[in-house]
Image (spheres, rainbow, N blue to C red):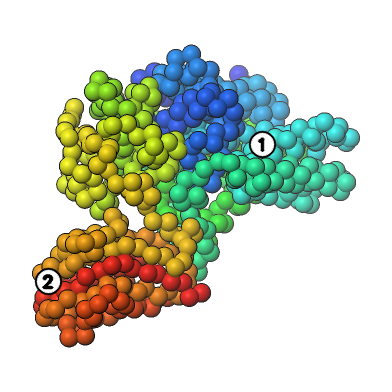
Amino acid sequence: MTLGGDRWLRAVFLATALVFTGVAVYLYAFRFFAWLESDAAVAALLAAKVLHAKSPVVTDWYYANGDVWFLGPQLLAVLPVAIFGAIPASLLIAILIGFGLELVVLVKVFARLGGERWIAVFAAMVTMMAWSNAHVAYSYIQLAYGFVTCLYLVSFQLCAGLAEDERPRPWRLALAALLIALISAQNPTRGLVYVVAPLLAACAWPWRAFPTRRRLVIAAAVIVGWALAYALYTWVFARVVSFSIPRGHLEFVIGGIGRIKANLVMLGRGLSVLCASGTEAGVRAIPGALLILGALVLLCREAFASRAFTALRMFAVVIFAQLLCVLVPLLIGNLLDGPEAVRYLMPSLLSMFGLAVVIAIRTLAAAGSAWGRRVAIGWLITVPLAAMVAAADTPPPKPRPYLWPDAAELSRVADELVRRGLTHGFSVNLGANLLTLDSGGAALTCPVDFRDAVLPLRWLTERRCFDPAVMPERFYVVAYQNETDPRAIHATFPHELERFAVGETYEVYVFRTSELSPAWFSLPILDGALATFPMRIPATHLQLTRDQAIVDAGEVVATGAPGTVLSGPGFDLPKGVYTATWIGSGLPSAGQTTFSVTMRRKVIAQTALEANAARTARGELTRLSFTLDRPRKGISFVIESAGGGRVSLHELVIESNR
């Protein structure tokens, strides 16, 4: 089928190309730097570490979500970083190289399926289109999901070629196994879900004229590739690299009916984000929703219409299986912790869009059913319309504290840090790596979390960030100009040497390193899956918030004023039965002291200590038992005084009884 055969189809192609080109030029030529945030800066910073280590796997780095990045966009940044240094311009050059490379790869993959170059170009554009704000963030500025989508499609293409070959050559089997190994070695669980399981499903599909021996050979190559990746990850990478704390994004847990209902609601909100960049998008989400629905119909029609084997049909089965392999854990587990978590579906949806273009055009070229042709025509016409609606979502988000950084002001902050000779400091996570990049690496800025105290955040950053041995004479903290951050800073650090600002969003505090307690670097408390028991938490721990209390001789002493004496730390605990014991002593006073265990402010255990029952020597003040039916977040231990009740607190001991 030629592009000039139907005027409407040519108009659809040209309109899609116009929107695609316009959005790409707008983003990369005019708005790229406004879209930058801490995670987006990682590619250039990690490339600098790769150059220094002379290895694609860097050991002096905190890897996030259990991933070991070595086959990723940071490799594309090695050359520009080597020439220009780790600066924003180097990152832009690397992203442009990666985006162009992705388009070339997609065109080649779809050319094998569509038969004509214009169909492949059309499919590649639809795959890479900025369908929403989320697509811009994860496929244009970071490249993360577009890059892995290309890797998945190439592995599927290699296996489809093997399935078509009556006598697959050993080197082609080895090549497919090697690529699957390289993909999966970065995270074997993700490789199992996104690559191995879908390919095995395609091998088990009831095709006609697909010999069992060939199925087994391909399946064996896939399994061998994944097994090599698992061995490399488990016995090499996991022993030499450093993972962020926590190592994984979430400890996966299967929920009940209530969890599934909540996940369905969250999935709907998330799909709205992918369709129109907002959970309240309303009618603006309709074109994107029609795009997803139509692509799914075309995919299912191709997969289930016939059992006759073709490479295109195998692709349809693989992508459909991949979608299910990702969707099922999202619906039954705890991965959907917010609408943005629906991005885990992006590789499947992006592949589905491109494949739907090929299927739709092939449907029009064949003498098929009338309804199939109507679906194909309707979906193809929807493509440029949805793209035009999505183009309105490409401007960068407005800066909002803790949600999106003010990239322009952070650039000025970085310049001022360099001018003042400040070389090591800390900032809220969204701005940390970006400040390092903006300063060309001259000011190493490390991520922290502002709660009741400032907590180190070992997340996608250098290990030397939190090494007191390399700290210079002065360090800085970049905070928001609000009430929360300064309070956390003053609760954590000594009095600042100076404070300055270059705009209205951020302010910088400068401290003397010799006055910083080395204990700060051991924060935060290891909780969740990393928790070990018995857990002993000093009452003076920075993650425990003091209110009606003072510190005297290393203990927290209640003043007797009514209200909260101590609370915190608001951390995560696994499923189990627990005992929490407060060690300390009672002080002569009237009234009582109440000890509680709360879960996101809901009391789950409580006891009271009367004044006349208080101990005057240090010992066990009280003991509380509580049970968690599943891993829970926001567990805190709260002590309140009423009527003048006073205690002196030494430590909290948490024991797991199961």
Is residue 301 shown to the viewer in this render?
A: no
- Left or right of 412, for residue 188: right
Q: Label 1 crowding class (10 Å Cα cut-off): few <14, some 14-19, many 20+? A: many
In depth, the one of 422 and 195 nearer the eye is 422
User: Mark 1 to mark 2: distance in Å?
Assistant: 62 Å
Q: Quadrant of residue 501?
A: top left
x and y percentages locating residue 356 in the rendered image: 60, 37
- Name above or below for residue 620 compared with residue 527: below
Residue 560: mark in rendering: 2
Q: Label 2 crowding class (10 Å Cα cut-off): few <14, some 14-19, many 20+? A: many
Mark 1, residue position: 182
x and y percentages locating residue 618 in the rendered image: 27, 74
The total number of labels drawn is 2
Quadrant (top left, top right, bottom left, bottom right) of the N terminus: top right
Write the residue at 25% across / 69% down. 649
Q: Nearer the N terminus, badge 1 or badge 2?
A: 1
Write the residue at 66% across / 25% down. 108
x and y percentages locating residue 352 in the rendered image: 59, 40
Q: Quadrant of residue 199?
A: top right
- Name above or below for residue 138 compared with residue 645: above
- Name above or below for residue 331 compared with residue 157: below
- Left or right of 370, for residue 294: left
Check disc 2 and give the amino acid type.
Gly
